[in-house]
């Protein structure tokens, strides 16, 4: 589904990614672990197409298409979904308006018919129920006054509605207490399936106890230093990133 | 990776799209009866004679004109424009075919087509049987009203809704009593000019205890070239009555600037309520700032009676320059004034707009919510006065001014004036300035929205408090307009 080959990228003049190779198949869950400043977030923004992040070499192929040639909204339409480390507030815009606008924008680009208000609400309520959320969330302004946990759950609700093929979770665990983490992880797990791939980006092993990956990669100094199975995460938890030359004051 | 759209691309986009998107920029080919260029006492006599006005009105106009000659154009607003040559314009232009029409059937089909193209319903028969009409329209084309719908239906309730030039003939006592009673002929440069040369506009009278059963609406259209538009609207809500009134405005694209200097006067008696909504979409000029309407307008409402209420809601997206301060004079005890405003400026547009709330009676209350959005090289200023007079015991005001900037070449300014002469008054002022963040845009785009849709969504959210005050019929249109006015302003 996703082929990243020799990916180099910079922010401004500063090279951050220095040759990433990664292959993700449908149904797989990959975790990328790494210390602060290793390039984890840069990788997620490059995949989603954020301005200010420049690819200097290499390629990213997504379902046979050159992902890097598409504007962010096209990537969203083809099924790339980024769950944000810090979901953004949009004052005055209700969650349901935002979700409906997003869903219909994506459906339009996919050549599907748009949903009217009633069809949308029915679907949104069903998804809320499926994820164990109240539909009161739909009425509130997008992420305004939401707790950290609510913001992340809101992102998961968006994900459930937009029905992505490749989901990138960018440090979804940051700022969550253990209960919120469990709820978010349950939401993510309920969306796992043979047609979906996930890329879980995290600093800590903690999240990976709840979202259990098939593969774990260690990212440091802009490159993948080591890859392995889920046990690699536990090893990192015990030994830290020191063996990769990283000196982190906990 | 494709290069990220940078600022210069963004500016190009703004230019292209904004220019294309002014869909009201067409000209109607119609034969007009036009006054010669220039402004003298003869011009005023010409207008007055055209309208077959009584002597008192001509005298009033001439008094205003003589006063105007002694006045200087105001320079305190934060707007810049070359000197206006008041002799180089026509002050009267009317379609030849319809000087005085008896019924809608007599309206020139070309005019009907014009309003159809603009999406304005000026045919009564289009309604289905059994469906109550929700809106009555007075259509003002250049200097005259060309059609007014549902007059008869409104008449059943004693409501008068007609062109002001007609009211002068049919209800001279009302016009004489109220004209200039809120905005005197000597009020300010542009209002005085209007008093001298006003041509048409709407007149509304709601009798005691009557709730107007439909929205009343005036649709202003400037069509002729080199012509100023000077309309005058007068709305009187007698004791215990209610009316909701809307106005919309458009003009063709032309390279020269055209002057629009209107006056609106509202009078609310005891327990009466007037809700006045504006969607102003005059031609804003092109991407280089060429052309566009100079919108210099005086709007003022007097809450004369106890418990009366006047509410202004405006969505200002058009005009090259907007100079406008819809105000409330809160004379009656417990009277309420409200001002809800969205002002959007793009390219080289300039807006200096706000309100005045003058608290005179006891326990008078006012609310001001002003949202300014600037993009391109536009400048937007909120200018507002809250004045509490010595007898206004217990007066309260809450003001909230929010500015949103798109890009880094535009400006937003907030100029509040607060004068309190009563210690019991409570006045609150909040102001914020924000930019649409790259983060918000990226978040929206990551969820599938195009940059245009994202800006429209974010700005609509920013304006929500104001847009929700608009009558349903206008709200959807206004939301679209907000999006269109800013399309392409972010890459």
Image: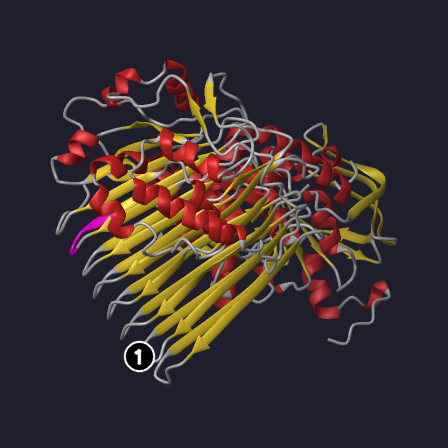
**What is the quadrant of residue B21 in the picture?**
top right
Q: Is residue B241 visible?
A: yes
Residue B465 on image: x %, y %: 41, 55
Label 1 neighbour load within 10 Å: few <14, some 14-19, many 20+: some
Q: Up-down: is B372 above or below A116?
A: below
Residue at 63% across, 33% down: B256
Give the residue pinned by disc 1: B391
Residue B286 on image: x %, y %: 65, 34
Q: Quadrant of the N terminus of chain A?
A: top right
In front: B48, or A58?
B48
Left or right: residue A55 versus residue B243 is: right
Residue A166 on image: x %, y %: 61, 40
Q: Is residue A93 visible?
A: no
Magenta-colored stretch includes residue B242: yes
Please, what secondary structure does the residue beneath circle 1 have?
loop
Residue with the most extreme top position: B109
Residue with the most extreme bottom position: B423
Left or right: residue B302 versus residue B466 is: left
Q: Chain of mark 1?
A: B
Q: Is the magenta region chiefly helix, strand or loop?
A: loop
Residue B293 on image: x %, y %: 56, 39
| Residue interval drawn in magenta | B239-243
Left or right: residue B46 versus residue A89 is: left
Q: Up-down: is B404 above or below B35?
A: below
Q: Quadrant of the C terminus of chain A?
A: bottom right
Magenta-colored stretch includes residue A39: no
Residue at 27% across, 59% down: B309
């Amino acid at each position: 589904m996703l082929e990243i080959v020799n990916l180099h990228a910079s922010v401004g003049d500063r090279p951050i990614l220095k040759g990433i190779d990664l292959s993700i198949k449908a149904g797989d869950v990959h975790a990328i672990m790494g210390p602060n400043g290793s390039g984890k977030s840069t990788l997620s923004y490059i995949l989603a197409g954020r301005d200010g992040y420049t690819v200097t070499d290499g390629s990213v192929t997504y379902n046979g298409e050159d992902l890097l040639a598409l504007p962010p909204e096209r990537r969203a339409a083809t099924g790339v979904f980024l769950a944000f480390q810090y979901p953004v507030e949009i004052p005055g815009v209700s969650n349901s308006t935002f979700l409906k606008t997003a869903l219909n924008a994506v459906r339009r680009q996919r050549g599907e018919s748009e949903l009217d208000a009633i069809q949308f609400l029915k679907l949104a309520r069903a998804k809320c129920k499926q994820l164990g959320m109240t539909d009161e969330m739909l009425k509130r302004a997008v992420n305004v006054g939401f707790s950290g946990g609510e913001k992340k759950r809101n992102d998961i609700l968006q994900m459930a509605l937009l029905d992505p093929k490749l989901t990138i979770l960018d440090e979804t665990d940051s700022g969550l207490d253990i209960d919120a983490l469990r709820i978010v992880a349950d939401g993510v797990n309920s969306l796992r399936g043979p047609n979906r791939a996930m890329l879980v980006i995290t600093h800590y092993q903690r999240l990976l106890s709840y979202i259990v990956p098939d593969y774990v990669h260690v990212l440091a100094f802009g490159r993948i230093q080591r890859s392995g199975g889920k046990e690699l995460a536990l090893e990192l938890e015990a030994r830290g990133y020191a063996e990769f030359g990283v000196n982190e004051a906990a | 990776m494709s290069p990220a759209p940078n600022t210069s691309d963004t500016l190009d986009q703004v230019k292209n799209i904004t220019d294309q998107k002014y869909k009201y920029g067409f000209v109607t080919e119609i034969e007009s009866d036009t006054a010669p260029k220039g402004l003298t006492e003869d011009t005023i006599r010409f207008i007055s004679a055209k309208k077959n006005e009584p002597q008192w009105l001509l005298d009033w106009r001439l008094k205003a004109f003589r006063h105007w000659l002694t006045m200087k154009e105001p320079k305190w607003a934060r707007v810049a424009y070359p000197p206006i040559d008041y002799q180089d314009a026509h002050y009267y232009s009317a379609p030849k075919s319809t000087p005085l029409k008896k019924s809608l059937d007599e309206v020139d089909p070309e005019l009907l087509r014009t309003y159809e193209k603009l999406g304005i319903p000026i045919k009564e028969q289009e309604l289905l049987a059994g469906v109550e009409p929700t809106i009555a329209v007075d259509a003002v084309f250049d200097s005259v009203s060309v059609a007014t719908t549902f007059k008869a239906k409104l008449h059943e309730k004693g409501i008068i809704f007609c062109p002001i030039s007609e009211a002068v003939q049919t209800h001279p006592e009302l016009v004489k009593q109220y004209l200039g009673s809120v905005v005197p002929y000597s009020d300010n440069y542009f209002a005085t000019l209007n008093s001298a040369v006003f041509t048409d506009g709407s007149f509304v009278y709601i009798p005691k205890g009557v709730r107007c059963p439909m929205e009343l609406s005036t649709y202003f259209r400037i069509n002729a070239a080199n012509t100023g538009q000077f309309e005058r609207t007068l709305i009187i809500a007698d004791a215990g009555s209610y009316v909701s009134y809307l106005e919309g405005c458009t003009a063709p694209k032309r390279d020269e600037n055209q002057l629009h200097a209107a006056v609106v006067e509202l009078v609310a008696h005891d327990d009466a309520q007037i809700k006045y909504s504006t969607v102003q979409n005059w031609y804003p000029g092109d991407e280089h700032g060429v052309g566009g309407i100079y919108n210099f307008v005086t709007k003022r409402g007097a809450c004369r009676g106890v418990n009366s209420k006047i509410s202004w809601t405006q969505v200002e997206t058009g005009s090259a320059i907007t100079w406008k301060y819809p105000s409330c004079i809160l004379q009656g005890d417990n009277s309420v004034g409200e001002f809800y405003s969205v002002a959007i400026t793009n390219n080289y547009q300039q807006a200096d707009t706000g309100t005045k709330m003058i608290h005179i009676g006891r326990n008078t209350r006012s609310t001001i919510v002003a949202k300014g959005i600037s993009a391109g090289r536009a400048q937007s200023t909120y200018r507002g006065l809250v004045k509490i007079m010595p007898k206004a015991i217990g007066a309260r005001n809450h003001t909230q001014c929010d500015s949103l900037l798109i890009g880094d070449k535009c400006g937003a300014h907030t100029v509040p004036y607060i004068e309190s002469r009563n210690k019991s008054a409570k006045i609150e002022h909040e102001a914020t300035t924000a930019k649409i963040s790259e983060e918000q845009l990226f978040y929206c785009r990551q969820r599938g929205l195009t940059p245009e849709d994202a800006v429209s969504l974010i700005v609509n959210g920013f304006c929500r408090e104001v847009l929700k005050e608009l009558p349903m019929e206008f709200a959807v249109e206004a939301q679209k307009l907000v999006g269109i006015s800013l399309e392409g302003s972010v890459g």
